[in-house]
């Protein structure tokens, strides 16, 4: 997702969709298009309480932009990991891919959630989210100005999505308690390798904004990388500001297999 991609209301199609995503990953097969997945999901009988129109929105507007990008690589990888990773690990993966597909969520997490967390606040409210959304509109981050109703809804979607992913207290509420949140080793390993294979140099990789979804700055990321080296996943050499990483695994598929067995 480009850094300058506009904010959209796409989150309204489904927020975090944790359980639905698990089911769709189970049904999806490599090479399957979003429309084919929708038909497979419709025929599977595994969404008995979801209308056909709603299911189509979930698949086309939520699942596909998050997991079927880059040739379906996110779906391929998560499908390999699904049987062995914990729910907490899975939701952290979902946070990464959902934030890439919905820049408004990623920016909210980086700019509001972690600022409040670092400041010692215990709550985030829909009004906090609303102020963030209105600021984004004023800064021209939407294609056109949103109505009052849309602003209110999107504000609630942001806090609701953070709750789905374990960052805020769950339940229908306008003020949510901030929960402890730390990147898990499996997710750190995946993100490091994925950024490496996406063409980021070792130093640029440490400063990538995806780490900020977990409240990490460059020095924090370096510590995570060093922990991965202790697990034998890579070798890191750090001298001042110069970082050199020896990536021991040849591709993402091999990494996913190693992570699934660890």
Image (spheres, rainbow, N blue to C red):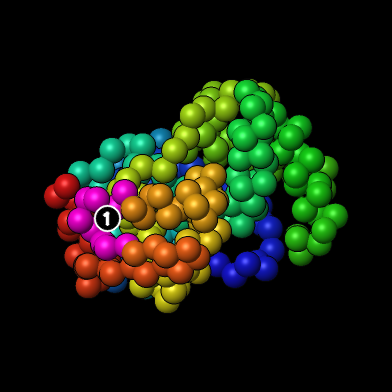
Looking at the image, which is closer to me, 154 or 194?
Answer: 194
Q: List x then y, in percent, for residue 159.
A: 61, 36
Is residue 221 within the magenta segment? no
Q: What element carries label 1?
A: helix
Q: In this view, does 225 lie above or below 178?
A: below
Task: Give the extent of the magenta segment.
Answer: 227-236
**Residue shown at 50%/69% (left/top)?**
204
Looking at the image, which is closer to me, 49 or 23?
Answer: 23
Q: Determine if residue 56 is in view.
A: no
Q: In this view, does 5 lie above or below 18?
A: below
Q: Is residue 250 left or right of residue 238?
A: left
Q: In this view, does 137 lie to the left or right of 231?
A: right
Q: In this view, does 206 lie above or below 172?
A: below
Which quadrant holds residue 248? bottom left
Q: Mark 1 points at which residue?
A: 229
Q: List x then y, in percent, for residue 115.
A: 66, 39
Q: How many marks?
A: 1
**Mark 1 surroundings within 10 Å by alpha-carbon count, few (fewer than 14), some (14 through 19), many (20 or more):** some
């Amino acid at each position: 997702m480009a850094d300058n991609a506009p904010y959209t209301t796409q989150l309204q199609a489904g927020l975090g969709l944790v359980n639905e995503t698990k089911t769709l990953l189970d049904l999806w097969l490599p090479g399957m298009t979003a429309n084919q997945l929708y038909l497979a999901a419709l025929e599977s009988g595994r969404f008995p309480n979801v209308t056909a129109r709603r299911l189509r929105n979930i698949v086309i507007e939520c699942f596909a932009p998050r997991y079927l990008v880059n040739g379906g690589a996110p779906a391929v990888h998560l499908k390999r990991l699904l049987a062995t990773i914990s729910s907490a690990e899975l939701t952290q993966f979902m946070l990464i891919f959902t934030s890439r597909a919905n820049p408004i969520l990623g920016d909210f997490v980086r700019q509001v959630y972690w600022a409040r967390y670092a400041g010692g606040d215990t709550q985030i409210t829909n009004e906090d989210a609303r102020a963030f959304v209105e600021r984004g509109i004023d800064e021209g981050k939407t294609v056109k100005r949103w109505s009052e109703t849309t602003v209110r809804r999107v504000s609630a979607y942001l806090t609701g999505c953070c709750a789905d992913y374990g960052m805020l207290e769950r339940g229908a509420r306008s003020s949510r308690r901030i929960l402890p949140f730390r990147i898990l080793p499996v997710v750190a390993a995946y993100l490091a390798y994925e950024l490496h294979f996406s063409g980021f140099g070792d130093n640029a990789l440490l400063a990538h904004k995806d780490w900020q979804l977990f409240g990490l700055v460059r020095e924090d990321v370096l510590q995570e990388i060093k922990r991965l080296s202790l697990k034998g996943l890579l070798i890191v050499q750090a001298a001042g500001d110069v970082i050199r990483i020896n990536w021991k695994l040849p591709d993402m598929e091999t990494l996913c297999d190693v992570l699934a067995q660890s």
